[in-house]
Each structure stands twice: as C-alpha cells, then as structure tokens.
Image (spheres, rainbow, N blue to C red):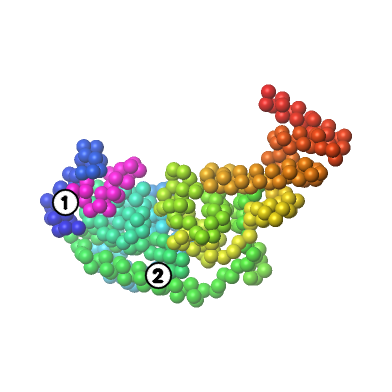
C-alpha cells in the first residue's frame, strides 16, 4: 500500500469520506479499488453485504461469565502456547501501548492482554475476551479478515469497516496446526496508528512460527491417544454416534451434531479428500463458506481427535467403520439378508445436505430393489423385514408382492390386504 493511502490526516480523511459514501450507498463497490487495497475493498463489500453495523465494534454473542469463558479457553488448541505468546509479545507490550489478542478460529477473542491503558481504550470498542471479531461479526478487522482469508495482514486506521476501530492499526497472522495444517486461530497485535510499523508484521509472524513449533513439541510430549475400532453410526432415527475403543479397553461414545455426522459421512465416501469449497457445496447449496467449514472442522477434531482428520484437502487419516459402509458392502456382494440386518433406517433422516440426500436415496432404493427382486424368487422373509421398516410401510409395490406371493399364508395375505386398504384410504 502506498504512503499516500496509509499516512497523514489527508489520507485518513479521504478514506473516512469514501467509507461514509460507501455505507450510505452514494457509491458502489466498483469505486473502492481506486483508493483501497483490493483485499480491503473486497472485505468492505463483504462487511456491507453481511449487514455489519459500522458504528459498532465486536459483536458480543452472549454474556460470557468467568466459568463459561474458562471452559471455552480450555478446549482451544492455542491454549498450550500461551507461555510463548506472553514471553514474545505480551511482556514487551505492557509498557508500549500495545494490545495482544489470541483469537479462536471462529473469530472469538480468547485472551486480550498487554498495556493496561490500551486495553481500557480497546474495551470501548468491545475488544474483550468472548467478543466476536470475525469479519462477519465486526467487519473488516485484522483478526477477522486474516481468518476469513487465511493470510497474514495489517489493517491501518480508516481501512477498518467499523468507525470505532479506525484509530487503531492491527496486525494479525493465522496459526495452523503443525501436524494437519488446519487453521486453528490467529494472533493479533493492536496499537495506536501512529505507533505501528512494518516491523510489527515480522514480529507477529516470528511469534506464530514459535507457537507452531511449540505446539508440535507439546504434542510429542503428551501421552499418545491411540484409538482403535472407531465406528460411525448414522442409520436410523437415533442421534448419530461416534464410538471408539481405546487402548485402555474403555469404550468412548460421542453423540455427534448433524453437521459433524454429515462431514464424516462425506469424507468416508471421498477417500481422495475434499477442499473446503467442495465440502461446503456438498453440505449446503447456498449458505456455507470456507470460513464456516474451517470452524466446523476445528470443532469436529476436538470431538473425535485431531489424528482422524487431515486438511488441504480435508480427508480421513485413519480407517473408520460405519453402519452405512457395511450395508453398502453387503449389497455389493449380494448379501441382501446381511444388508437388511444392518439397515436400521434411512441415512441421517434429519440432514438437509443435498449430498447426504443423494446417498440416502441411493442406499434406500438400492436395498428396496434388491429385496423386491429377491422376493420374486421366493424369499418372502426378506420382504417381511423390508415392509417392517419405516420406508416399507408405504411401499405399495412391496405390499402387493406380499399379498400375491405364493409362499404367503392366509394370515400374511390378510395383513397385506388390510395394509393396502389403509394406504388407499389415506391417499383418497
């Protein structure tokens, strides 16, 4: 960025005027490139489109008490690196008007430390632990935009989207998991615009390198969490579950969110891996972006263990079993009885993912077709099993086959006739 864009009161006034005209609609986004760096212009456009209030700082998600904040911090992958951050950044910041922030991958501020006077001023714009400083929550800002783009950057004064933040210059560098390469948060250094320098970025970059090295060494010194027999259950109306038999012989069970179950199913069906954009498209036709995917993957790793999921592209690093894979395998080898035995119901029936819906249809229709074909060859027992499932209750063709089956006894035929009459009545 040229000096004329970053320094001096005239440049700041020009940016503030441009900002005012942009947010009031006097000019559109095409006019921004003449004055702003492209990454700032793009960020302003995203901030406006997502409805960020330019007169607010960070958006507080909810009142966060000490216990809740401590719990949130405890589960963060950056927590073990706090001594490194304090030694390399915070200790020198305390007397230099600098605020150091450790930010989670979703943009939540976890720790805000440094010069006490500067921290007091930063509180006026809600730059406090627990506040949402993602780009979606606070507009163009160093930690939020660095996380959105997964790149290091400085944002100077009036380049910020929120007016409250424009007296500051902020420098942020993303932090990645040293084993998987996954984005896990960022380190931000915030200071008065007059005090900021180009060397600040080099300082934060070097700190992040030290953090990633520390995390790698920390992991080597921790007892290995060796798990065997990981199993994913996603068929039927029960909540999806992740079950692991540990080395100590203990079985650990985790109930998964629907989104995490969707992700694990899709990764299991794509052993070659999926980019963030591809995974977002498979999960939702419209509403997801790469930032949301990174946040969900970070949360998923904390639930099942980081050693199961890799990134760039996202992929499974260890084999897992699943009821879905078992039913598909049974169908593939022609074991219809085995497939029916393992099929407890539709795949993730509450999921709205288009890719999961396709898999659900593929599995259900494939099993149905196999059962109806087998029943035509005399295997009436398989037909009974299918019709007892939720999908079979409204399967008119299946009930007709049962009614007319030469191996059906009188009671079975009567049941089929009655069920067909009920279907006809329901359908008018």
Q: Is residue 168 left or right of residue 391?
A: left
Q: Secondary structure at mark 1?
A: helix
What quarter of the picture does the C terminus occupy?
top right
Task: Answer above or below: position of 425 versus 2.
Answer: above
Task: Answer above or below: position of 221 versus 118.
Answer: below
Decide if residue 402 is in sight here.
Answer: yes
Q: Nearer the viewer, residue 259 or 99?
A: 259
Range of residues picked out in magenta? 32-56
Measured as percent of width and height from the top left, residue 110 is found at: 40, 59
Q: Secondary structure at mark 2?
A: helix
Q: Quarter-wise, where is residue 389 in the image?
A: top right
Measured as percent of width and height from the top left, residue 105 is found at: 41, 57
Q: Quarter-wise, where is residue 206 in the image?
A: bottom left
What quarter of the picture does the N terminus occupy?
bottom left
Q: Nearer the viewer, residue 43 or 353?
A: 353
| Label 2 Cα neighbours within 10 Å, binned few <14 / some 14-19 / many ≥20 | some
| Label 1 Cα neighbours within 10 Å, binned few <14 / some 14-19 / many ≥20 | many
Task: Answer above or below: position of 221 versus 409.
Answer: below
| Residue designated by label 1 | 12
Magenta stretch contains residue 50: yes
Label drawn at residue 212: 2
């Amino acid at each position: 960025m040229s000096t004329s864009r970053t320094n001096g009161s005239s440049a700041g006034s020009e940016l503030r005027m441009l900002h005012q005209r942009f947010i009031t609609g006097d000019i559109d986004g095409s006019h921004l490139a003449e004055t702003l760096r492209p990454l700032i212009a793009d960020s302003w456009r995203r901030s406006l489109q997502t409805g960020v209030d330019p007169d607010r700082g960070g958006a507080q998600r909810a009142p966060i008490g000490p216990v809740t904040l401590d719990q949130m911090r405890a589960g963060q992958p950056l927590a073990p690196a706090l001594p490194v951050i304090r030694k390399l950044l915070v200790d020198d910041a305390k007397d230099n008007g600098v605020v150091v922030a450790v930010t989670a991958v979703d943009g939540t501020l976890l720790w805000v430390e440094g010069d006490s006077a500067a921290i007091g001023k930063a509180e006026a714009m809600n730059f406090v632990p627990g506040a949402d400083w993602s780009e979606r929550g606070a507009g163009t800002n160093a930690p939020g935009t660095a996380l959105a783009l997964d790149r290091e950057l400085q944002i100077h004064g009036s380049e910020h989207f929120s007016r409250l933040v424009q007296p500051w210059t902020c420098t942020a560098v993303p932090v990645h998991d040293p084993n998987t390469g996954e984005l896990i948060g960022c380190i931000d250094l915030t200071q008065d615009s007059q005090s900021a320098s180009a060397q600040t970025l080099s300082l934060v970059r070097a700190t992040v390198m030290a953090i990633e090295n520390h995390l790698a060494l920390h992991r080597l010194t921790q007892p290995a969490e060796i798990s065997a027999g990981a199993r994913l259950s996603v068929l039927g109306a029960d909540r999806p579950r992740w079950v692991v038999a540990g080395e100590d012989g203990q079985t650990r069970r985790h109930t998964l969110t629907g989104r995490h179950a969707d992700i694990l199913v899709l990764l299991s069906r794509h052993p070659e891996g999926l980019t963030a954009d591809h995974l977002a498209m498979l999960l939702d036709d419209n509403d997801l972006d790469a930032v949301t995917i990174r946040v969900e993957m970070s949360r998923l790793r904390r639930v099942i263990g980081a050693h199961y999921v890799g990134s760039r592209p996202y992929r499974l690093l260890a084999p897992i079993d699943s009821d879905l894979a078992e039913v598909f395998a049974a169908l593939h080898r022609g074991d219809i009885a085995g497939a029916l035995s393992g099929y407890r119901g539709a795949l993730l029936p509450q999921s709205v993912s288009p890719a999961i819906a396709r898999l659900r249809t593929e599995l259900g229709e494939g099993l149905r077709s196999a059962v109806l074909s087998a029943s035509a060859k005399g295997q009436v027992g398989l037909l009974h099993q299918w019709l007892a499932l939720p999908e079979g209750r409204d399967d008119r063709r299946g009930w007709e086959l049962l009614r007319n089956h030469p191996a059906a006894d009188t009671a079975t035929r009567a049941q089929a006739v009655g069920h067909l009459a009920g279907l006809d009545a329901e359908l008018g």
